[in-house]
């Protein structure tokens, strides 16, 4: 039975169209899913929308619509955006679906039956944008939300509470015994520090609104939106309905989350799982913010960038590559259109695109359009040696959730191959064994590069693969598995027709687009 890899994104509030920050998280999860499929693993990739809570209810009211009608429309924006960005999610969950209501109520009932929920009155400062309470000490001057910079509201209501405080020791023990359960390590340390400061019980129901999932033992209450949303990860694999499916996927879950929702996922969620009698999540991967002008991309700051429009402008492969290559996963990254165009021209047009174009051109002029086989690996074949190193480094980088390093290694092989062509100048050689040797090596390097690069640039990789005369596609499931050996040197058979076409990445000097507003149409 193949290894399994279950990867999730946060589920996004559909109160406006997706922006580049949500696209960054989703494209990153997609690249991880694509790589693990390449390695022959059975993959489940989940994303979706978080549709309950006060923020959604108010936004729907502003539009003169019911919350359900509003989210029916806006959830489709996310489906359409991810399709446009070639995201290969296996499931798209909406928290308004019946399957999710069933799972949330079953999960809540388990925690209640286990004695970890009680009823009490709560009063506190609430940020509607965060859908979260804040202590007075956490607010900025003027009683503003520390994340959104917007005024908070004072709420008083009778709620049910989750005994989060009872799980301090268990959470610390779990972190002590679970190694890299949260990566990068700095984020793991942040979660542990938060727990050591002392945990307070959390309000998990609301009576002030009715847009939510009814509490199973007290339908006058609805489940707090964050408590509701976190359960989506187990809804999708059959919690409470299909125990066999749930048990087969839950041990392999990897949550990709933003650093702003760390405490919900790295403190609340594992404690909730413990309280319900299931294991905490296997691993959480925390990414940083995608910044514009040094600020987090946010609907409230009006600094959003539309990823679909960017993809239409420069190409979906170019946008995907930039998001994965430019930002170190776990750190913040500053987005600018100028940097996107610069990365496009340097890595895609001048390196990968140029390599594919010049190899096809010279094979056409010197080899009659038929690709020669590469030289065998060995001490006299520097490109083969470089390829072996690159493949090993790329594997290691994908394994530690570092797509930027995997792509940097892959493009080093592109650079080395271009450098060999510059040194040998096969376009000046007479047809014969010497030119065949150089071009065979270049074709084999391109074959390996297209497999390694396919999680980032699936369209370009498939087109280069086709032009090399190879069957199938470079992203075929299992093609990068070590047992198949297709990333070993020598896989290009020679004797195939190599096709020349238009440049895959023509150089660009496009004007800078303006940021979109957060006003939905």
Image (cartoon, rainbow, N blue to C red):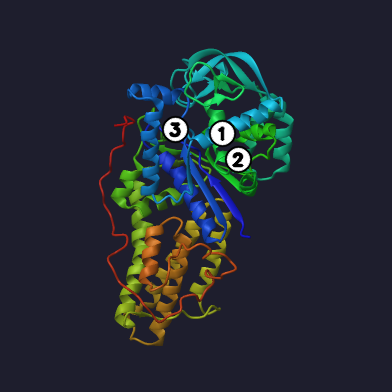
Helix, strand or loop at disc 1? helix
> Quadrant of the rendered structure where residue 270 is?
top right
Helix, strand or loop at disc 3? loop
Residue 235 % position (x, y): 56, 39
Q: Which residue is denoted by mark 3 in the rendering?
A: 13
Depth check, front residue: 44 or 483? 44
N-terminal-most mark, 1 or 3: 3
| Pair 2/3: label in front | 2
Q: CA distance from mark 2 to mark 3?
A: 26 Å
Q: Which residue is denoted by mark 2 in the rendering?
A: 241
Depth check, front residue: 16 or 335? 16
Q: Quick one: label 1, few (<14), some, or many (20+) residues within 10 Å? A: some
Residue 201 % position (x, y): 65, 22
Q: CA distance from mark 1 to mark 3?
A: 21 Å
Residue 129 % position (x, y): 45, 25
Helix, strand or loop at disc 2? loop
The answer, for residue 198, to whether it is visible in the render is: no
Labels 1 & 2 near each other (Cβ < 8 A): yes
Marking on residue 14: none
Residue 340 % position (x, y): 36, 49
| Pair 1/3: label in front | 1
The answer, for residue 380, to whether it is visible in the render is: yes
Q: Which residue is denoted by mark 1 in the rendering?
A: 102
Above or below residue 332? Residue 140 is above
Above or below residue 84? Residue 289 is above
In the rendered image, which quarter contains the C terminus? top left
N-terminal-most mark, 1 or 2: 1
Depth check, front residue: 344 or 317? 317
């Amino acid at each position: 039975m193949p290894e399994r890899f279950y990867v999730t994104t946060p589920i996004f509030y559909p109160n406006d169209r997706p922006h580049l920050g949500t696209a960054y998280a989703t494209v990153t999860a997609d690249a991880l899913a694509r790589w693990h499929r390449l390695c022959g693993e059975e993959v489940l990739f989940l994303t979706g929308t978080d549709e309950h809570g006060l923020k959604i209810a108010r936004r729907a009211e502003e539009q003169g619509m019911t919350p359900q009608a509003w989210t029916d429309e806006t959830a489709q924006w996310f489906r359409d955006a991810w399709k446009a960005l070639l995201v290969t999610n296996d499931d798209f969950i909406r928290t308004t679906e019946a399957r999710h209501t069933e799972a949330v109520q079953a999960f809540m009932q388990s925690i209640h039956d286990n004695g970890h929920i009680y009823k009490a009155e709560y009063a506190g400062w609430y940020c509607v944008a965060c859908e979260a309470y804040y202590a007075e000490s956490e607010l900025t001057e003027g009683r503003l939300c520390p994340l959104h910079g917007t005024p908070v509201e004072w709420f008083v209501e009778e709620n049910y509470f989750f005994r989060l405080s009872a799980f301090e020791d268990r959470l610390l023990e779990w972190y002590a015994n679970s190694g890299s359960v949260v990566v990068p390590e700095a984020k793991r340390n942040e979660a542990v520090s938060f727990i050591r400061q002392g945990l307070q019980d959390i309000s998990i129901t609301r009576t002030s609104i009715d847009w939510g999932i009814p509490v199973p033992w007290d339908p006058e209450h609805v489940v707090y939106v964050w408590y509701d949303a976190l359960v989506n990860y187990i809804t999708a694999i059959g919690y409470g309905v299909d125990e066999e499916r749930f048990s087969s996927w839950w041990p392999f879950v990897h949550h990709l989350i933003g650093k702003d929702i760390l405490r919900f996922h790295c403190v609340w969620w594992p404690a909730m799982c413990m309280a319900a009698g299931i294991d905490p999540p296997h691993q959480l991967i925390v990414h940083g913010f995608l910044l514009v002008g040094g600020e987090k991309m946010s609907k409230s700051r009006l600094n959003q960038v539309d990823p679909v429009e960017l993809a239409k402008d420069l190409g979906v492969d170019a946008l995907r590559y930039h998001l994965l290559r430019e930002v170190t996963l776990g750190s913040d990254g500053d987005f600018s259109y100028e940097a996107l165009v610069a990365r496009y021209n340097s890595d895609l047009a001048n390196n990968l695109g140029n390599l594919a174009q010049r190899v096809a051109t010279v094979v056409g002029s010197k080899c009659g359009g038929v690709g020669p086989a590469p030289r065998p690996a060995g001490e006299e074949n520097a490109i083969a040696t470089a390829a072996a190193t690159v493949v090993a480094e790329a594997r290691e980088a994908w394994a530690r959730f570092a797509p930027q390093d995997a792509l940097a290694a892959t493009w080093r092989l592109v650079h080395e191959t271009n450098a060999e062509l510059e040194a040998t100048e096969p376009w000046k050689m007479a047809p014969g064994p010497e030119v065949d040797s150089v071009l065979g090596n270049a074709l084999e390097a391109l074959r390996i590069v297209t497999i390694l690069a396919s999680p980032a640039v699936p369209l370009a990789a498939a087109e280069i693969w086709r032009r090399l005369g190879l069957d199938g596609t470079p992203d075929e499931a299992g093609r990068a598995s070590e047992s198949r050996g297709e990333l070993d040197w020598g896989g290009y058979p020679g004797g195939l027709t190599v096709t020349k076409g238009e440049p895959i990445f023509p150089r660009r000097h496009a004007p800078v687009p303006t940021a979109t507003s957060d006003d939905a149409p």
